[in-house]
Amino acid sequence: MEIRERVEPLGDLWLWVAEAGETDAPPVLLLHGLYDRWETWLPVVPGLAAKTRVIAFDLRGHGRSSQPAGGYTLRDYADDAARLLAAMRLNKSVVAIGFSLGALVALVLAAEWPMVVRALVLEDPPLAPPSEGTRLWLEALLAAKRAGVEAAYELARELDPDGTPEDWQRSALWLCSTADGPILALLDEGRQPEPLDLLPRIVQPTLILQADPLLGGVLDDDTVQRALRLLPNARLERFPGSGHAIHHEQPEGFLEVVLAFSEEVTGRAAVDDPAAGSGAGG
């Protein structure tokens, strides 16, 4: 499998983009979580690329993309994604697959730019308003990042005691390479807009993947039931025994349900894809 990486200039910033799969296959857009990079998806990229055109990128402030001083609301991230898709001149709308923070970005993208998103996969999305525990976690991330790689490594060990030294090292390096802005925005500005307020606007088919709340999953049962009531066209797949990052902990199960969903929605929408003929950027 070939992964094609490049810098995509978007005027005021650039994004580090990776692609895999055939260019004429149905496109999927992968949106990573806080202080991740596109490489977080590597456990599932080969399986996705066998049947889709995989498009992934480092969110602004993350990895090798630009790190502007500000502009880290959900709308800023979603606007970057929309501009990237417009620059790529796709003739098909995408299945947007978002993990954690990336799931919230996917929601905004689908609500604000509905013509570019055919369907949504939301992997353990943090839909409920942030708790005090979330704030303490964000403060710990920011303090460790500013203290350096050794402190970030120790925090990674504390947060993931069952991980490996390689996992902790990667987490530490990725955290320290992330700008302060993404964390500060979540601490100081909120998420803007609130995800639950967006759900009634989502008309696209939506697949929610729920990790195990007892093992670090952030989507609790009450919130997921509220989300299903608010989303007009959604279904739920639970992953008992999986922590927050389902695509890492249960990649085979992730691929099975996501590819089945993708094939269903791309097959159903092939005749009247809203983006066909107009360019995915609208």
Image (cartoon, rainbow, N blue to C red):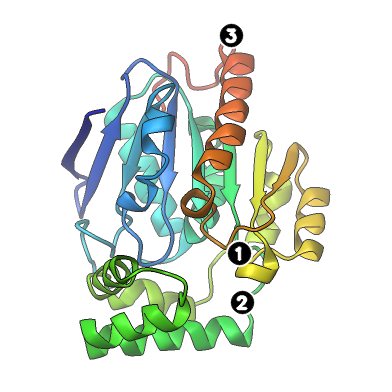
Circle 1 SS class: loop
The disc labelled 1 sits on which kind of residue? Pro
Crowding at label 1, few (<14), some or many (≥20) Cα neighbours within 10 Å? Answer: many
110 or 132: nearer the eye?
Answer: 132
The disc labelled 2 sits on which kind of residue? Pro
Dividing the picture into quadrants, the one containing residue 201 is top right
Q: Which mark is residue 271?
A: 3
- Are discs 1 and 2 less than 8 Å apart at CB? yes
Percent x, y of residue 224: 75, 57
Percent x, y of residue 86: 34, 33
Q: Please give left or right for residue 228 compared with residue 198 in the image.
A: right
Residue 282 visible? The answer is no
Circle 3 SS class: loop
Q: Earlier in the sequence, mark 2 or mark 3?
A: 2
Crowding at label 2, few (<14), some or many (≥20) Cα neighbours within 10 Å? Answer: few
- Are discs 1 and 3 less than 8 Å apart at CB? no
Q: Which mark is residue 130?
A: 2
Percent x, y of residue 17: 25, 43
Q: Residue at x 32, y 19 (%)?
A: 22
Quarter the N terminus occupies = top left
Q: Which residue is mark 1?
A: 126
Of labels 1 and 3, the one closer to you: 1
Q: How far apart are labels 1 and 2 at the CA level? A: 8 Å
Percent x, y of residue 274: 55, 21
The disc labelled 3 sits on which kind of residue? Val
Q: Compared with residue 267, is residue 204 higher up or lower down, i.e. above or below?
A: below
- Are discs 2 and 3 less than 8 Å apart at CB? no
Q: Residue at x 65, y 58 (%)?
A: 241
